[in-house]
Amino acid sequence: MNFKKNTLILINRKVLATQLQGFFLKNFQENLFYIKSILEKVAVKNKKILNWFIKFLTSCKFRSKLLTS
């Protein structure tokens, strides 16, 4: 019974995470140029933020859009 309950909890978390990710990515695409302008201002001061953000974009498959715009 515990296994079944734990499995359902994990499935529910994954569904929620997927929904949140989809919501975030939709908003992210809409605000890509705004985020890029903020990133450029911040990244001038902190290369660690720039590197983290590029890794994040790579995982989201938005790197080419950000770097070519």
Image: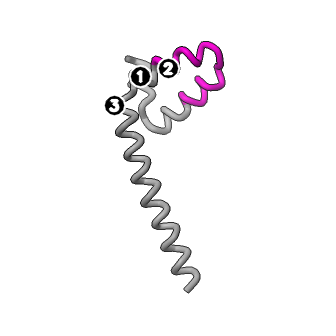
Magenta: main secondary structure:
helix
Q: Is residue 6 above or below residue 67?
A: below
- The amino acid type of the residue labelled 3 equals Glu
CB contact under 8 Å: marks 2 and 1: yes
At x 46%, y 66%, the residue is 12
Structure colour scheme: one colour
- Residue at x-position 52% and y-position 80%: 4
Callout 2 crowding tier (Cα within 10 Å): few <14, some 14–19, many ≥20: few
Q: Which residue is mark 2?
A: 38
Residue 26's spot in the image, x, y percent? Answer: 35, 39
Q: Secondary structure at mark 1?
A: helix
- Residue 60 x/y as whole percent: 45, 38
Crowding at dot 3, Cα within 10 Å, few <14 / some 14-19 / many 20+, comes out as few
Residue 67, quarter of the rendered image: top left
Badge 1: residue crowd in 10 Å (few <14, some 14–19, many ≥20): few
As drawn, the label of residue 51 is none
Residue 46: x and y in percent read 65, 19
Identify the residue at horizontal 52%, vertical 21% (top origin). 39
Which label number is shown at residue 34? 1
Quadrant (top left, top right, bottom left, bottom right) of the C terminus: top left
| Residue denoted by label 3 | 30
Looking at the rendered image, the quarter that the N terminus falls into is bottom right
Relative vertical location of residue 20 with respect to residue 28 in this rendering, above or below: below
Q: Which quadrant of the structure image shows residue 42?
A: top right
Compared across the picture, whether 55 is left or right of 47 comes to left
Q: Is residue 34 found inside the magenta-colored segment of the image? A: no
The boundaries of the magenta stretch are: 37-54
**Disc 3 from disc 2: Cα separation:** 15 Å
CB contact under 8 Å: marks 1 and 3: no
Judged from the image, the secondary structure of the residue bearing numbered disc 3 is helix
